[in-house]
Every structure is written in C-alpha cells, then in structure tokens.
Image (tube, rainbow, N blue to C red):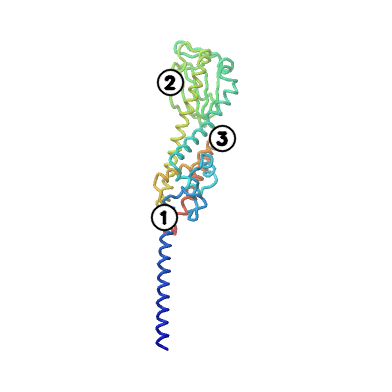
Amino acid sequence: MKIYDDEEQKRKDEEDRRLIEEYQRKKEEMDRDEELKEAELRKNHGRGEDDSSYGLGFEVSKDMGFLDQLITCLTKPKKLLGVAQLSTGKFIKYMIIMALLLSFMTYIIPVAATITGFKGFNHLFKESMPSFKAENDTLTADDKFQLNLSGFTVYMDTSEPTVDTKKIEGSGVYITIGSKNIEMVIIQAGMSSKIYSYPVGVLFYNGVTNDTFVKAIPEIYMVLGFSFLFMTILNILKYMIWALIYSIIAWGYIKRTDLHMDYWDALRLSFYAGTWGMILPNVNMAFGYIIPPLIIFFAGVFISLRFIGISAGPYVRNEIQD
C-alpha cells in the first residue's frame, strides 16, 4: 500500500511540475507578446488613438486639423509628443497657417485700419497729405506729414535736406522723408540709429505729385500684397529659428528616452511647443504693446520650454531621472 501511495504521489508531483512549466511557458509567451505590442506602439506612437489599451498618454488622432492642433498646443502640453508625430504635410500646413494668421494680425489689420481711417488711398493722397512735388531731385511739400503704419511710421518734413530725428517725438522705427534724403531710423529714448539712407529720387522721381500716387493706387495694393507674403515668409523663418534653439532642449530630453524619435521629431515638438511664444508678442503688438515687450518675450520663452518639459519629461528613463 505504501508503494502505491509513493507512486501515486510521484505521479501527482510530476503532473504538478508539468502544469507549472506549462504555466511558466505560457506566461513567458504572453510577456513577449506584450513587449512586442508595446514596442510596436512606441514605434508608431502618436499615430494611435487615445483609447488604446497600450497608450503612452500622448496619442492623438492622425486626422487632426489645424484648429485641433492649435487647441492642443495651447491647452494640452502632455499631448505635444503625439502632435509632433503627425505627418510632415500637417506640420508644414500648421506652420504656414500660423505665419499667415500672425501676419494678418500684425500687418493687414493695422494697415487696413489706417487706410480706413484716412477714408482710402484716394482721400489720403489728395486730402490728408500735403501737396508735394519732386523737381531737380528735390522734394517740396506744403506742410509736415506723419503716417503710422504697422511696425513703422512715415514722417515727412521737406524743410530740411534730411529730417532731424531730434525733432521727432516718439520712439520706434521711422522712415523719414526730407527734401533730399529718405532714411530709415530707429528712435529709442531720444537716441536714433540709422539703418539706411537713399536719395529722395529713389521714391519721388522728378515730376511726381499727389496725382501720381493716386494713379498708382492699384500698384500700391499689389505691393501691400507682396509685403504681406514677404512678412509671412519672414515669420516662418523667424519661428523656425526659435524652434531650432528650443530643439536643443527637446533633443536633450528625447535622446534619453526609449521612444523611437529622431531630431526631426524634436524640432517639430519645439515648433508646436512654441505656439504661445508666437502668439503672445503678436497679440501684444496688435493691441499697442499694452504689456512691456520684454516681459512678453520672456513669458513666451518660459512657456515654450515648460511645455517641452511637460510633454517629454515623463518618458525620460528612470535611471536618468533618479
């Protein structure tokens, strides 16, 4: 009987071992499958959906439009890694639309307001501006004239060959028009710095009068359109340069994570994270600098860098964080 019990126990022990081994083998297979799924998700992170059971916390819909991207960039910094993984086409579209909107805000609206305030170019040249005429490479006008435009001020005083900037009350960028010379100067705290100087004949050739400008109104609108596009291109270049600067920080985060991201992803993350830094200075400019520009500048830089840290920081490897 004892022998039977021993054999029975032995058989049970072997069965238990077999079951344990089978369980361990299946668990290892499940773990491997889980790792593969997570690795695949990490490889394609940002292109999944928010309800993924293997989510990393920053997935966004690949069908996001410009408005969705903008709202995410302004209010959901934890999702910026996902936004940075959208297609190159969506990134370029976001960059161009942002530049167009900011240029419209700081150029088209103020210029349109100025033109409307003067009741149109025809009224501006015939009624608002003093009568002027260019002869023998010299411009003469009946009176002084000042026109505030977006980002600069036109100041005409033909009583002198070159406008004396000490007589100008105000600060900023000025295009001064004297009887002989046109200058662009920056006036700040009573001090002026000349950017360029040209003979008055460059703009006011011999025979030019108020009526000449009235006839050129269609060409002026064309120049304004080209100026708007040029400003848009400048905005794209300016904000890409800032993104390059921010990307130094972003790449420092990303290369210490296990995420499958490269420097291009870091650059796009930096551009998206810099959205507040783009909007704040331009809104402040549009409202006439209601807040000192330096404060707005540092606020934009701080928010942009903070958003980069919020989005990428949680995925830095634990050993580095510790």
Q: Tag 3's secondary structure?
A: loop
Residue 217: x and y in percent read: 52, 18
Numbered circle sitting on residue 198: 2
Residue 232 location in percent, x, y?
A: 47, 31
What residue is shown at x 45% (from left), y 32% (from top)?
Answer: 234
On the picture, is 128 further left or further right than 32? right
Looking at this view, is 113 or 202 the one in front? 113
Where is 294 relative to 256, above or below?
above
Q: Quarter-wise, where is residue 280 in the image?
A: top right
Name the spot of residue 29 as percent of width and height, x first.
41, 63
Mark 3 belongs to which amino acid?
A: Tyr
Residue beneath disc 1: 39
Q: Amino acid at mark 2?
A: Tyr
Task: Point out which mark residue 64 bears.
Answer: none
Q: Nearer the viewer, mark 1 or mark 3?
A: 1
Give the answer, above or below, for where 242 lies relative to 190: below
Q: For this rendering, which residue is in front, 204 or 235?
A: 235
Q: Is residue 157 above or below residue 61?
A: above
**Mark 1: which amino acid?**
Ala
The crowding category of the residue bearing disc 2, from other C-alpha atoms within 10 Å (few below 14, some 14 to 19, many at least 20), is: few
The residue under label 3 is 289
Mark 1 and mark 3: span between their CA atoms?
49 Å
Q: Residues within 10 Å of mark 3 (few under 14, many from 20)?
A: few
- What's the CA distance linking mark 2 and mark 3? 30 Å
Distance between the alpha carbons at the discs numbered 1 and 2:
64 Å
| Residue 297: image location, x then y, percent | 51, 40
Q: Which of disc 2 and disc 1 is earlier in sequence?
A: 1
Judged from the image, the secondary structure of the residue bearing numbered disc 1 is helix
Quadrant housing the N terminus: bottom left
